[in-house]
Image (cartoon, rainbow, N blue to C red):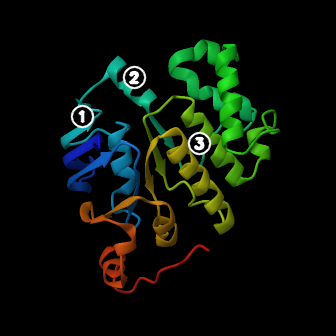
Amino acid sequence: MTQKILEVEKLNKVYPNGTHALRGVSFDVNRGEFLVVIGLSGSGKSTLLRCINRLHEPTTGKILFEGNDITNIKGKPLRSLRSRIGMIFQHFNLIPRKTVLTNVLTGTLARTGIVKSIFGIFPDEERKKAMDLIALVGLTGKENRRADNLSGGQQQRVAIARALMQNPSILLADEPVASLDPATSHSVMQYLKKVNEELGVTIICNLHFLSLVRQYATRVIALKDGILIYEGNPSEIDENWFQTIYGEDAVEVTID
């Protein structure tokens, strides 16, 4: 039986400047899915992810995570929630002067605490787990390299390992390959697929390129002006749907 891990119901987000970023968005995510969100810049993709992990406050609507209403939680329950919802960003958000290993270990912040993290005091079992995750993302041998000495693709893989240190049920990826070249983009997406299939982590990923969507997504939703206009199989996004989502003058760019 398929188990829902996330339920989004009639979600609205209006920013203080009056921008209506999300308009009545509703969808479910099943445990183990690799869901991709597509749409033009400004369609609401990033806002959606930030509402899910509560970096942004939803205006109205409801978000259920593992059956619990997380729409308005604050304080300790919110911190606990964020330890189970990992997130990686377009620009990596690593500590440039710190090593790969230290950056990955910062993913234990919720368990370790700020003071111990600052002084690099991590239990041996956490260090072992970090090394295992560094191996998982193909960076064995680079644990002691500074983050700012790595390529963009390698830095994003460090960010994936750091997020996995939280033991997340869901991993949110906000345009994770937007800053990368085509070959590196595939490399990062393949590691996300590995995390999804081997560790069973549910992934919700914002992407621009349909060629990547068709290759890696198990399901796709599309946003336009904050409205969910498509939900289904990526292979069913034909030319008509492409123009509906991206505009009549849009031309599809393929990442080989």
Which of the 4 image quadrants contains residue 38? bottom left
Give neighbour class at mark 3: few <14, some 14-19, many 20+ (Cα, 10 Å): many
Residue drawn at point x = 68 percent, y = 66 percent = 183
> Badge 2, how many Cα within 10 Å: few under 14, some, many 20+?
few
Secondary structure, mark 1, is loop
* Horizontal and vertical percent position of residue 227: 23, 62
**Tag 2 or tag 1, which sits nearer the N-term?**
1
In the rendered image, which quarter is residue 225 located in? bottom left
- Position of 76 with respect to 68 (left or right) is right
The local secondary structure at tag 2 comes to helix
Quarter of the image for the C terminus: give it.
bottom right
Q: Are marks 1 and 3 in contact (CB under 8 Å)?
A: no
Label 3: which secondary element: helix
Residue that label 3 marks: 160
Left or right: 63 in relation to 144: left
> Three-letter amino acid code at disc 1?
Thr
Disc 2 residue type (three-letter): Ser
Between discs 1 and 3, the one toward the N terminus: 1
Nearer-N-terminus badge (2/3): 2
Q: Specify the amino acid type for callout 3.
A: Ile
Q: Which residue is labeled 1 in the image?
A: 71
Q: Is residue 76 above or below residue 10?
A: above
Label tally: 3
Q: Residue at x 52, y 17 (%)?
A: 111
Q: CA distance from mark 1 to mark 2?
A: 14 Å
Q: Which residue is mark 2?
A: 80
